[in-house]
Image (cartoon, rainbow, N blue to C red):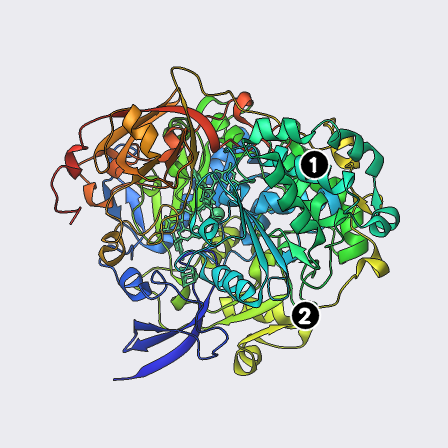
Amino acid sequence: MTTTTSYTVCTICDAGCQMRAVAEDGAVTKILPHDSPALARNICYKGTAAPQIHNHPDRLRVPLKRVGARGEDRWEEITYAQAIDEIADRLQAVVDTHGPEAFAVSTSGWNTQTTHGFDRRFMNLLGAPNWISGVSLCAGNTAAVNRLTYGWFPFPDLMNTNCIVLFGHNPRKHSWTPIYNMVEAARARGAKVIVLDPRVSEQAEKADLHLQLRAGTDAAMCLGWLKVIFDEGLYDATFVRDWCVGFDELRARVDEYPLERVEQITGVDRELIAEAARAYATADGGCIPWTPVTDQQISSTSAIRLHSILRAVTGNLDVVGGEMLNGIHPGWRTEADLQMHDAISPEQRAKQLGYSTHPVYTYRTAEMLRPHLQRVWGREWMDQVMGCHMANPSEVFRAMADGDPYPIKAFFALGNNALLSYPNQHQIHRGLMNQDLVVAHEIFMTPTAMLADYVLPGDVFTERPHVADTWGWGNRLTLSEQAVQAPEQASSTFRFWTDLGRRMGFAEHFPWDDLEALLDHRLEPSGRTYASFAASVVMEQAPPEYRKYRKVGFATPSGKVELSSSILGDLGFDPLPYHREAPAPSEQYPYRVFTGVREDPFFQTGQRNIPVLRRRSPSPKLFLNPDDAAGDGLVDGQWARLETPTGAVVAKVAVQSNMLRGHVRVPHGWWYPETRGALPLAGAFVSSDAVLCADGDEFLDAEQGIPHFKGFAGRVVACAPPDHMSTETLEG
Ligand SMILES: Nc1nc2c(c(=O)[nH]1)N[C@H]1C(S)=C(S)[C@@H](COP(=O)(O)OP(=O)(O)OC[C@H]3O[C@@H](n4cnc5c(=O)[nH]c(N)nc54)[C@H](O)[C@@H]3O)O[C@H]1N2
Ligand SMILES: Nc1nc2c(c(=O)[nH]1)N[C@H]1C(S)=C(S)[C@@H](COP(=O)(O)OP(=O)(O)OC[C@H]3O[C@@H](n4cnc5c(=O)[nH]c(N)nc54)[C@H](O)[C@@H]3O)O[C@H]1N2
Ligand code: SF4
Ligand SMILES: [Mo]
């Protein structure tokens, strides 16, 4: 028996822990923690379940072609070469009839890992602007909004900070373990932790201060903090004078939010608001780590901007314990460097859906930032957190479903369960049903893949070499070695785009024959090959350099921190942050529903088919406060239906005293792989939060067009368990 041990970067979730894969006779049999004591704790039970996931009997191994009606889940096995041939011909037919804008791609890049900018490269060569991603709801959009204010999306210096402010963000031992470990270490060092969460979350339980705000009121809360910070002179007046523009306008806006008003909006006592604001502003090095809760709200752009503004006016930008503007690794070609955004014409870029309606995350804003990014970071196009200048997902699905404003007729999902991963699931479904060509690149047969014409089997992270670059967000490079061969015809998304590109006339732009050759190219600026990198580096990061803006300024039009955003103003939006509400709860729909609270055993829509993980959480749960449950006559453990004007899902009631009254939590991403063949699309509509979330204008953030997942109105009624859950087999 041959046994090998390799360094590998886990992509089961997006935290990217480096760990060790043990392979015996060509299969990964065991995952070990890192051999560096500093990194050994960065591993969770999803990571150690990698062998069960990767060697699962249901892993897709051969390309499949649909033979039944779309969504019927009947297939024939074909060769990879036939699949690429037919996909190329059918995509070309769509482009010839409707133009390249009729082709859309959805991916998230975390898990396929080997995207390497090739999806955009292919689309840009074709002239296709409609690329979307799950990061439109997660960090990618935070990055885009951060750039409006200071031209970069900073990373918190958790190792050195004295104060951590968690807006909902709730890392745990088995949920974003590395961030959890850093927060724990900071706490042990004496750093203060402030949590803002409608629930007494795990982080809130241990926090120095917990502000139990109503869901969806984060922007108002931040305006309240600024009111205290300005009124009490707790800001860094020198930094504001020398490095910020728009202070007076901002101050006038903040004055519209006296603490009485903020207390009324957020439901948090004004004294506590002031105490928290003071604690953050006076900490010598405080940080507000990225959080998804402000990525998914109707006031998202304002709330994210307010985090940026708080960081700036308190003097926490690019200082020890604050927020690092690290830039990118100088010896590395980033995704953006490979994407060829100059190959697509400005006319085609302007057809990107959302370009005129919700432009902040589209090409339109990226085009405005180009000279400034070039000045500071040496690149015109930046792709932090795997997704910049993308189309608006809701508009893409509308175009797919209704041909409005123009038809989209070909849709590819790579490492993304698109049907469940955006708002308004029924519209996504209609859109997928209305396509001439749907391709899924997957490791399992998901509901989205069931709707495809072709399903291509993907490889997984232990089956390919990679150098992880913190998703273009930071300057760290981390080695991920190939431990084993992919099964049968499974391969990477790099292989897919290369083969499709070569087949469709772009061979000269896809010259790399394998991933190692491409990694050589990406490492070339540092004078290394992948082999020499792998032989000498496990992880590398340049030592931090602080206050770099003193040399280069900020990558904004003014070169300063724009408290009042000139770009937002030029785009016709309010250049100052504000608070906006979604339609309020009513007598008919009395609760504020929020999606989220990630479940430890699963990443997003995945792993419900992995027994060792599913056993830890057999069914989806609605969290309700005991008084609310009693008022509705609901008891812990019974099934209930959560209804919004958009749709209804069922889940088990979990009565929890840590929930704020009037709030209901619905989990993300539930479907029932075990019902494949028995329920349509394996129960994709039974318990999926995306069924509930609307994406009409009254639910969309104006500037980015992202939906409101944090506090939409709903009601809960008792119901019978769904048929497939009525036996206790799964529950046990
Ligand atoms: N309705 C709703 N939508 C959401 C959210 C929500 O809470 N509600 N959350 C948002 C957030 S925070 C995020 S981060 C995104 C996440 O979006 P994604 O990261 O795209 O997550 P999933 O949609 O679960 O899709 C991941 C798919 O990739 C497959 N996969 C895993 N590894 C590989 C691989 O190596 N190769 C290939 N080809 N496939 C692989 C898995 O089987 C799975 O089906 O979703 C966002 N969308
Ligand atoms: N095990 C596991 N870990 C994961 C993931 C997973 O699927 N499984 N997913 C990863 C990904 S992609 C992400 S994005 C993160 C997300 O993980 P977190 O950042 O921890 O976010 P959530 O778990 O969605 O919700 C966190 C908290 O937000 C609170 N909350 C709800 N609405 C609001 C609001 O309007 N304002 C505020 N301030 N708080 C609110 C909730 O009560 C909850 O306690 O987790 C990552 N880690
Ligand atoms: S936290 Fe767990 S699932 Fe996520 S990357 Fe780390 S080991 Fe993998
Ligand atoms: Mo996320």
State the image coordinates of residue 706 (x, y, percent, origin top left): 55, 33
The residue nearer to you, when weighing 43 against 364, is: 43
Residue 271 percent across, percent down from the top left: 62, 38
- Mark 2 sits near ligand 3, with its Cβ under 8 Å away: no
Give whichever of discs 2 and 1 has the lower sequence position.
2
Badge 1: how crowded within 10 Å, few (<14), some, or many (20+)? many
Taking 54 as reference, is 290 above or below it? Answer: above
Q: Which residue is mark 1?
A: 364
- Which residue of the protein is positioned furthest toward the front in this rendering? 271
| Residue drawn at 30 percent across, 44 percent down | 65
Dividing the image into four quarters, tell me where ligand 3 lies. bottom left
The image quadrant of residue 542 is bottom right
With 707 as the anchor, is 488 left or right in this view?
left
Q: Which residue is rendered at x = 22% and y = 53% of the image?
A: 615
Residue 158 pos. (x, y %): 60, 62
x 79%, y 34%: residue: 251
Toward the viewer: 640 or 328?
Answer: 640
Residue 274, picture quadrant: top right
- Percent across and percent down for residue 543 are 69, 72
- Label 1 sits on what residue type? Arg
Closer to us: 209 or 49:
209
Give the quadrant of the N terminus.
bottom left
Does the image show residue 510? no
Query: At label 2, which amino acid type do we have?
Result: Gly
Mark 2 = which residue? 331
SS category of the residue bearing label 1: helix
